Image (cartoon, grey):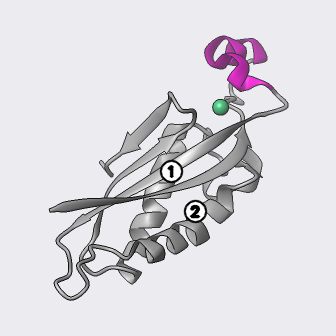
Amino acid sequence: MLYISRKEHFNAAHKLYNEQWTKEKNLEVFGPCANGNWHGHNFDLIVTVKGIPDPETGFVVDLKKLSTMIRAEVIDKLDHKNINLDVDFMIGKMASCENIIVEIWKIVEKHLPAITSRGKLHCIRLYETPRNYVEYFGE
Ligand code: NI
């Protein structure tokens, strides 16, 4: 079994704010992340696919096709956007890395069979900062 990854990048704004809470409680829990006028991050997204290479190509998945799919289905929807307001798959959800990555998983998993018959989605890693990241394995 091999694990092959593609890294993509986007930047986006968000805030962490629970509308059911008071402003004071939001500031207490989320600190500056609750800032009403938003803040931004440079996100790195790493998608890892696992599989046995095709004997004819030597590929588990064509990384060019994987990149094109991730950009079309995920990056274009997030890049230079406000995650709370502009991103259809995040409407009504807290714009945390944890929630974002679960939605990205659903999208990538849905579109992966169109570009590889051998590769299965293994892991998604989303860096919000160089030091903070979340990983998701679909469970
Ligand atoms: Ni943030």
Q: Nearer the viewer, mark 1 or mark 2?
A: 1
Q: 49 and 4: which one is in front?
A: 4
Question: Residue 8 placed where, x, y %?
Answer: 54, 56
Q: Residue furthest bottom?
A: 56
Ligand 1 placement by image quarter: top right
Tell me: 98 left or right of 76: left
Q: Amino acid at mark 1?
A: Leu
Question: Residue 27 placed where, x, y %?
Answer: 71, 15
Q: Quadrant of the N terminus?
A: bottom left
Instruction: Write down the quadrant of residue 57 in the picture.
Output: bottom left
Tag 1 and tag 2, C-beta contact below 8 Å = yes
15 relative to 30, above or below: below
Question: Residue 127 placed where, x, y %?
Answer: 51, 39
Q: Which residues are magenta?
A: 23-35
Q: Amino acid at mark 2?
A: Val
Label 2: which secondary element: helix
- Residue at left offset 37%, top offset 45%: 136
Q: 7 and 88: which one is in front?
A: 7
* Pointer 1 or 2: first along the chain: 1
How dense is the environment of label 2, judged by Cα within 10 Å: few (below 14), some, or many (20 and up)? many
108 relative to 43, above or below: below
Label 1: which secondary element: strand
